[in-house]
Image (cartoon, rainbow, N blue to C red):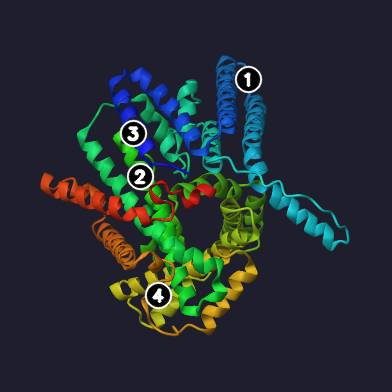
Amino acid sequence: MTVFTSAGFIILFVLLMIVYFVVPKKAQTPILLAFSYGFYFMVSRKLPVYMLITTAVTYLSALLLQRITDGQKTYLDDKKAELTGDEKKEIKRKFEKRRKLVLVIGLVINFSFLAFFKYTDFLLDNACSLLANLGLNVEHQALNLVLPLGISFYTFQSTGYMIDVYRKKVAAERNLPKLALFVSYFPQIIEGPIGRFDRLASQFDQKHSFSFDRLKKGICLILWGCVKKLIIADNLAPLVNGISENYSQFGGSQILIGMLFYGIQLYADFSGYMDMASGYSKILGIEIAENFRRPYFSTSLAEFWRRWHISLCSWFKDYLFYPVFMSKGLMKLGKKLRAKGHREAAKNVPTFISMAVVWFLTGLWHGACWPEIVWGFSNGLIMIFSLQFAKAYDGVNKALRIKTDSAVWKCFRIVRTYLLVTLLNFICTFATFRDSLSAFAIMIKNPVPAYLSVSYLFPGIIDRGIVTLAVTLLACLTLFFVSLYEEKKNVLLYEAIMKKSWIVQGLVFILLLFFVLVFAVGGENGLSGGFMYAQF
């Protein structure tokens, strides 16, 4: 899959820039829309049929929701003097029922495509297994459906917009090309971020002119994203994949090294994409949502998920957690517990149930398989456990006289969180649960290296040569120190560089470009490498 780093795409993007900044404001949205659909076809080699259907359903549903909302307001304003309070309530109830029906139909249609392509084989497999356990042998042939590119991301983005219209947070968009661009905007169609209509689509209304300052910032972000993706992630792939696919041939310390590097690989791959997407979008004058905020400096699992894949977590919070938490069933449960004097339980139980639902579905979103579901649910359980015993935890710290505000304690918590994330990754990195448990058992039984050598500690990478290994480790260290600088200063390094002299800026550009052109060729997929999160 050729995205962002191919010569063909770069040439097309330069042509887009020339046309985009020359044409009048009213033509910029149609041009971006045409490029986005062309980009989708170029990457997936398929027509964006399902994205078109999702766009049409979203557009019509939102317009109908807006029409019902406006109709209610007009009717109540016209009949204001004639209606009693009870009559007004009844009218509002009827209109609300219509709005809810439209929303449900729109959501069902949009999510049905995602469910069909992503979960059909999973559901059939489990249904047949269940019937087999009941003594009924039913055979079925796997459909092996190919997941349409970006369907998880544009489905969530579209449904978020529909819900916002339903909640009257935004007005329905009547300009079809503008809404279609919101759904299909090329920098975020493959891996997100999952944008919000009020923040992204409003930028399409503005006239965007060429800016040399934005061009410099965008190129800097793109090159830094290339370093993450093509030098770090793609060069770590042989080590991580080799160990996860053939774990029985490796020692415990090698499995541990592989899992520790897996976290770095995944972050470099995903955040590298985000940097490139942000860079291309920034050049065009459009800011997309932040999706990472140095997650491996988190001091708890909850904080990690506030910093990792931010747009997905905020989507689940706004469109799933709060609706479940505020549902009639949980509200009644909370009242019953409060009436019986269980105030703490009245607050915690609805919260914990809502979290369990969210994290079950988070796991399911990441993959149609039980390891991913268990991985998601395990994240939720750990955070529920942490909330439940937070006071006891604080009490232990006080009893042991631990200086919780010290740098040493913070470092301990950061390392602990990274190890916890690594441990959770055991659940879904290997092919099956049995493989995960077997690999973990090998790691526990044989934690000490049989001998210390470069080939033992870095299998896979060393096959590409000592220079590739050295550059990969240097890039990892650079990523760490850049992240440390940004964490301490609370500023993005590329923004700080752009404030320096043109000599400093030029040296940074030359250095980044040199490393990408010289050392990225050895990556897993060369300069046209695919992205790990595209499979979701």
In the rendered structure, the answer to whether residue 142 lies left or right of residue 375 reads right
Dot 4 or dot 1: first in sequence order is: 1
What whole-number distance in Å separates the C-alpha atoms at marks 4 and 3?
40 Å
Decide: few, some or many residues near mark 3? Use Cα within 10 Å; few <14, some 14-19, many ≥20: few
Q: Which residue is mark 1?
A: 83
Nearer to the camera, 376 or 6: 6
Dot 2 or dot 1: first in sequence order is: 1
Secondary structure found at label 2: helix
Q: Which residue is mark 2?
A: 276
The nearer-to-camera label among 3 and 2 is: 3
In the image, residue 313 lies at what x, y percent? 49, 51
Residue 499 seen from this side: yes
Nearer to the camera, 195 or 148: 148
Q: How many marks?
A: 4
* Amino acid of disc 3: Ile
Residue 295 seen from this side: no
Q: Which mark is residue 455?
A: 4
Residue farthest to the right? 135
> Residue placed at 24% from the left, 29% from the top?
210
Dot 3 or dot 2: first in sequence order is: 3
What whole-number distance in Å separates the C-alpha atoms at marks 2 and 1?
57 Å
Marks 3,1: beta carbons within 8 A = no
Nearer to the camera, 254 or 124: 254
